[in-house]
Image (tube, rainbow, N blue to C red):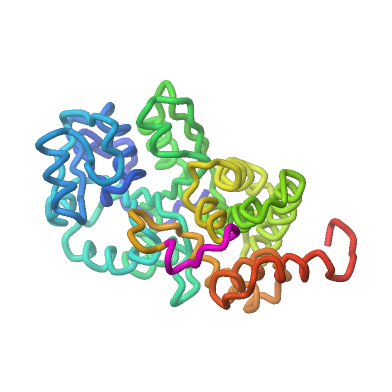
Amino acid sequence: MKKAGFLMDPNALDLQHVSVVGAGSWGTALASLLAEKSQTVTLWCREAEVARGINETRVNPLFVSEHALPSNIRATTRLQDVARNPLLVVVVPAQFTRPLLESLRPIVRSDCVFISASKGIDVETLQLISDLYRQVFGQAGLERTCFLSGPSFARDVLAGLPTAVALAGFRDELLQRLQHYCSNSFFRIYRTDDVVGLELGGALKNVIALGAGISDGLGFGHSARAALITRGLAEMIRLGGAMGALPSTFAGLSGLGDLLLTATSENSRNRSVGYRIGRGESLEKIHIGAGEVAEGVRTAQAVYHLARKHAIDMPIANAVYEILHENRPPRSVVSDLMQRDLKGESR
């Protein structure tokens, strides 16, 4: 684990007052989880009605209204309110991460620690979320940031169902401190120093899950879905290797674990969007009135360009891109996939 550039003792980190930035379903679930360990959790909400609902009725009225929230969660729409705490858990869509970090930079503490729970790739720059933290907060700020990913649905965590995820970072002392702080009797965290692998797993699995949903929507059955998931994982490993990730990371929670959950569950937004496309709906129609983002739709664009940049063969990810962003008929794309030149499985 790297040590240079770190400016604080993780054991001195005060975790009695923490913040969560983003009050979608996952941000709300993490706020509820942390409220068990801290005196207060300040939760930043983009929507005033969400902040009002949480403070007045103890529920998030837009995203998870069926779950009551702990009384020590205080919701706000002011970034200044969350910036004062020593730990910020950032849970916003990937495409909103850069402007949010830019807004936080002048107001957060100089020793602030971050946990990024966002999954995706910046479409404009093809950068990972960790690259954005480095650009905004410098190397020292990046080393005070850890990255959370793995197979986890917000409603499962809010219901106290057993869940295991991974936390990646550059400093083992900080990882251990946050690992113990965030874990409890039903939420278990494993740690890793493969930040790139963890981030890519969390982003790429959404694209493959869209493909699995399209396959299901077309009625291709379980055999086709199993093949798509397996070959999709091979593509994830291929791109990860080109970008410096460890192949073993993709066999773990943030790779295969998250891929299986997202590509097979009816509760997955990405699979659900893919399923509706497979059934003949347009992406524009699906997005009308959508409450939360299916990150894979934008990530498919980034992955398509990353594959070209690194000269990596990713036929499934490319197929998803063509269906979503070039309006190619799904059945025609699948036909092309199945009739490609035959090759060895390891290639």
**Is residue 196 at least partly visible in the picture?**
no
Q: Is residue 80 magenta?
A: no
Q: Quadrant of residue 242?
A: bottom right
Q: Is residue 26 above or below residue 275?
A: above
Q: Is residue 5 above or below residue 169?
A: below
Q: Is residue 24 above or below residue 242?
A: above
Placement of the C terminus among the 4 image quadrants: bottom right
Task: State the residue in front, 78 or 270.
Answer: 270
Q: Which percent across, then down, holds residue 91?
A: 34, 51
Q: Residue at x 51, y 51 (%)?
A: 272
Q: Is residue 281 magenta?
A: yes
Span shown in magenta: 278-286
Q: Residue at x 46, y 72 (%)?
A: 123
Q: Which percent across, then down, holds residue 77?
A: 14, 53
Q: Which percent across, then down, holds residue 59?
A: 21, 36
Is residue 40 rendered to the left or right of residue 229? left
Is residue 223 rendered to the left or right of residue 97? right
